[in-house]
Amino acid sequence: MCRSLLTLLFCLWAWCAQAAPPSVLEPALLRQLAAGDSEARIGAIQQLAGSRDPARVGEAAQLLQALEEGSLFAAGERLFLMGESDYRELATGATLAELPEGADGVMVNNRIRGVLANARAALALADPDAAVRRAAARELQTNAAYELEPVLAAALAGEQVEDIRALLVLAHAQANLGNPDAAARLAAVRALEASASPNTRSLLLPLTDPALEADARVREQAARSLKAIESSLALGETLGSVFTGLSLGSILLLAALGLAITYGVMGVINMAHGELLMVGAYSAYLMQSLFRSQFPALEDWYLLAAVPVAFFTAAAVGMLMERTVIRWLYGRTLETLLATWGLSLILIQAARVVFGAQNVEVANPAWMSGGITLLPNLILPWNRVIIIGFALFVLFLVWVLMNRTRLGMFVRAVTQNRAMAGCVGVPTTRIDTLAFGLGAGIAGLGGVALSQIANVGPDMGQGYIVDSFMVVVLGGVGQLAGAVWAALGLGVVTKFLEGWAGAVIAKIAVLVFIIIFIQKRPQGIFALKGRFADQ
Amino acid sequence: MSSATLSAPAPAGRVPVTLRLASCLERKAWISLGVFLALSLVAVPVLHLLVPPESAFHVSAYAITLIGKIMCYALVAVAMDLIWGYGGILSLGHGLFFALGGYAFGMYLMRGIGRDGSYGSDLPDFMVFLDWKELPWFWLGTDSFGWVALLVLAVPALVAFVFGYFAFRSRIKGVYFSIITQALTYAAMLLFFRNETGFGGNNGFTDFKRILGYDITAPATRVVLFGLTALVLAATLVGSAWLVKSKFGRVLAAIRDAESRVMFIGYNPLGYKLAIWVLSAVLCGIAGALYVPQVGIINPGEMSPANSIEIAIWVAVGGRASLIGPVIGAFTVNLAKSWFTVSFPEYWLFFLGLLFIVVTLYLPQGLVGLWKQLLARKGGTA
């Protein structure tokens, strides 16, 4: 506090005197930075990064920041720092209004930029604020050069906070990989075993090569460490595939749940089901626009409002479709297929006319960005985690609705035996409409979820109709459990195949698999048993 | 079964083939077929080649390409009608067979470019672009017209046979079958979109130069292709008319209407369904092969599920289970399409969507059914 006040006074004085004191940094270092080639500049930056003296640290940090921002200029061997409206010559402290003739910005190429980021991080390790030190230590996890080793060692010695220490140990070990002393290298390789990041793998790989690493013990240890890292990386990759698969599966589940209900009840395939997803996604877009213009303060929460709006909008569209078209085609399933395809074309074109043919932008709310880091190469993005949770929540609601309410009982009754249900007084036509509305509403919810991870455009639903029907086929008609297993299974299998053979081949493989599967079990995984099975 | 068929004279084996063929169409139908052939084989070539472009009677190259294209579509529609109208099986994957035929013939046309491509190489341009050094194995022999003509028939037939055998054997039918055929064409589309598949990826085949040594854009070549398409269409119509009136056609219709009963009587539906399914696919392949040289391009978009489902609407608009219906439907819808997409592009999908709904709701027999109804009403009042 006292020091900063002093600095302020000092600056004030300096401003009055129109001249700052000369830099505490060595003139030779400044010359090297001003006039040297990339190699010399990197050397200078690394020397600056090694500063421990507080006065030097401040000045070095300022200089490196200026270098990164492009506000450092060189004329011959003289170095100038751009201020608000003037330029300060670092070596002398003199202030100039104009740069001298021939002055140019100090060039920063990609190599220098990489060194620069680590150098600045190394300087920040001396910061009293733990959060700044933590960020700096994270930055140093990649490409810490051997030149930074003394700084890192000193920082490690002085560090009290446990998790920063752990990060610094890894950074220090990385820097030590370049140590000419084989024992230090050996220790470093051993320490790096604990870090399971793809970066460490690529750092350790050269150390197993006899041409690049002379010491046999280091090579042996590097191979051992690599093995440990690789198995941990493989674990991360596998878990990552499972997770993205579950995330895809949860979207498929939301799309297929609605389809399973409408197909189960009416025995028709609603080819416009994908467009109901689109209706839901556009509802999310409209709510976002509404919140932006009306309640900017609450913008982050538009998604919560979008959920019921999407449900009811899609349900209304679905009920309208049922009342005007599908009902009149009862019993003519193939014609219904064509008629609903016509409906989907109309909905797509309507979306194009109203919202334009381009995709619209639906932003993730702030609380859905970021993710949970489980392993260095396994980050679970919040939006996907939330979508999985949302799908489970919807699934739970549907389960309650189907199994614990009167409406659900009626829907199940109509699914199993329409004529009999009608005989005992179930209003089958009303149930048809309501069930269709329910299925459409769930599709709308799926659309909201989809708007968070995929493009929102008029054609977005087209790609999902085949997939979601596959889920229904695989799971068996009228079976919630079947739909769940089929959706999650398809999602995970697709993602694994994608990792192994690419997206297109994965898709084809899954389709072929389903075609073969239906040969064996035309009723799906969870077939209805008893006398309804062969309907 | 009506009493008229019961009292039909002489067993079919005794009647000469010519008579049997003659009896498969009514006199009016033969006359209209003759008029159609006269128009497309004589009138159109004369009006295109001999009448000067300034004349009001000149048929433009655009019109020839358009009508030729629609005749290919009509051929597909007839093929679709055989399987849907007479077999009761709605395929949403017929675009696949059409495209397979088109691609097979496209391979021949690509080889026909020779060294006239933009890279001046023996290989097709897209292979040079992908830095391939030699033709993949499935391109071998594609410079021979005979081999490619065989491919045009065999590839769709083989795909249809394998798929149909497994599907019909496990008695997949109704919407299940429709959706699986849709998935099939969708998967194929994804496959053909990949560059590595070896069929030109996104762009497919285009920039053809020659067919059997003749310039493919020359008016005479166009006219020949046009006439050939008309001939094939006419032959298909006659052949189909004979087929659906034969015993095979009767059994097929019976399977459509009550499959279990047919099985109880002692027929195995598998062979019948498979035969009509493969035949339908082969017809589509031929249509594709005729389509590609006239339109000058084939790409994976032809396999998109939307295209295949449009084929169904041609048939539905014209009228299922009548052979002239699909032809009328293909012409009506496609003429409407080319008019809409020029005049009101943004309303075409609305129109098409409404067409799907209106036809299924109000015109289950299509335009042919409507015409018959009108005739019946007129006859009733008279």
Image (cartoon, coloured by chain):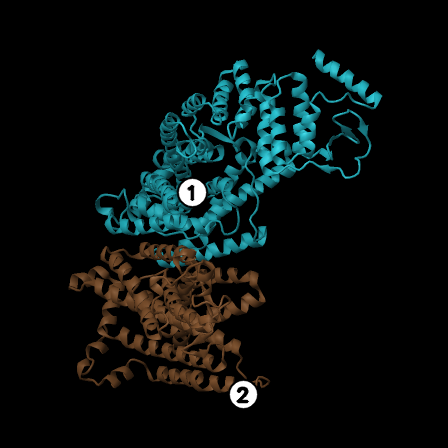
**Image height of B200 relative to A245, above or below:** below
Q: Is residue B184 visible?
A: yes
Seen from the viewer's position, the closer of residues A353 and B302 is: B302
Chain B: drawing colour: brown
Q: Would residue B165 appear left or right of A101 to someone viewing this image?
A: left
Q: Is residue A264 visible?
A: no
Seen from the viewer's position, the closer of residues A174 and B65 is: A174
- Residue A463: where, in percent of width, then height? 44, 50
Q: Which chain is cyan?
A: A
Mark 2 Cα within 10 Å, few/some/many (few <14, many 20+)? some
Can you tell which mark lies on residue B51?
A: 2
Q: Nearer the viewer, mark 2 or mark 1?
A: 2
Mark 1 Cα within 10 Å, few/some/many (few <14, many 20+)? many
Quadrant of the rendering where the N terminus of chain A is positioned: top right
Q: Would residue B24 appear left or right of B58 to someone viewing this image?
A: left
- Residue A159: where, in percent of width, then height? 53, 15
Mark 1: amino acid? Leu
**Image height of A462 relative to B253, above or below:** above
**Image height of A304 relative to B343, above or below:** above
Which residue of the protein is positioned furthest toward the left in this rendering?
A: B266
**Structural distance between the alpha carbons of marks 2 and 1:** 64 Å
User: Which residue is under mark 1?
Assistant: A438
Mark 2 residue element: loop
Mark 2: amino acid? Val
Mark 1 residue element: helix
Residue at image coords 79%, 31%: A86
Quadrant of the image occupied by residue B381: bottom left
Seen from the viewer's position, the closer of residues B266 and A400 is: B266
Identify the chain of the residue marked 2, using the numbered disc in the image. Answer: B
**Image height of A436 relative to B328, above or below:** above
Q: Would residue B362 appear left or right of A287 to someone viewing this image?
A: left
